[in-house]
Image (spheres, rainbow, N blue to C red):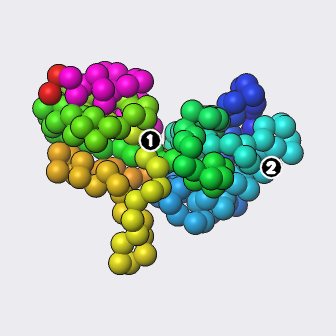
Amino acid sequence: MELIRISDSKLKITLSVADMERYALSSDSMDYDNTETRRAFWEILDEAKHKTGFDAAKERVFVQVYPSRGGGCEMYVTKVGTLLETAEEKPPSRRRPRVGIYRFSSMQDLLSACAALAGLGYAEESAAYAEREESRYYLILREHLRAPVGRDGTRLSEYGFLEEYGERLTGCVSFAYIKEHAEPIEMKDAVTRLSALA
């Protein structure tokens, strides 16, 4: 495992195939909602703290995972600090946001989804991308785990209504695919800006 501290708030982690096996991780199935993935992730960050001084234990983090051709992966861990904290979250370190990725088959569906979110007062950061060759559009949201728990014990998405417009994607690999194959439309406030066009 290679650890590079890019800044006080950003860390690059390179995992080899052996590292992936050691932590029982797979680029295809890596998902923070999975207990084993969470455990492995925090073990890696604990090692990073001892080797580089990068301490994210009391921070909220945004993780980007890019699979490598050799079977390992590169992870970029960014502390998001107080950006995601709200007055009702106590303690803040216990409630971590997750990233929701939605795919739409038309620009109109993307605009309608943004309008629906804006109508509900969505105020988090959001980004939109277009994969023009395939006529696919993506919306990336910060989601908080405030949603109800279903009968099977899994947490339901509070943004489930967006599936009326498109499809919710899972796994970190989706984000890597979007970064490689799609072009950004709006990187900071997609919901507000695109809802105005609906």
The answer to which quarter of the image holds residue 40 is: bottom right
Type of amino acid under label 1: Arg
- Percent of width and height locating residue 132: 21, 26
- Percent of width and height locating residue 136: 21, 35
Disc 1 packing (10 Å; few <14; some 14–19; many ≥20): some
- Per the image, label 1 sits on a secondary structure element best described as strand
- Residue 162 left/right relative to 59: left
Viewer-closest of 14 and 150: 150
The residue lying furthest to the front in this view is 87
Disc 2 packing (10 Å; few <14; some 14–19; many ≥20): some
Q: Which mark is residue 191?
A: none
The answer to which quarter of the image holds residue 39 is: bottom right
Type of amino acid under label 2: Glu
Measured along the vertical axis of the image, is residue 22 above or below residue 182?
A: below
| Magenta stretch, residue numbers | 175-196
- Residue 62 showing in the rendered view: no
Q: Residue at the location (57% across, 50% down)?
A: 89
Residue on which disc 1 sits: 142
Q: Residue at the location (60% across, 65% down)?
A: 36
Q: Which mark is residue 47?
A: 2
Q: Where the N terminus falls, by quadrant?
A: top right
- Count of numbered tags: 2
The answer to which quarter of the image holds residue 82 is: top right
Q: Where the C terminus falls, by quadrant?
A: top left
Measured along the vertical axis of the image, is residue 142 above or below residue 144?
A: above
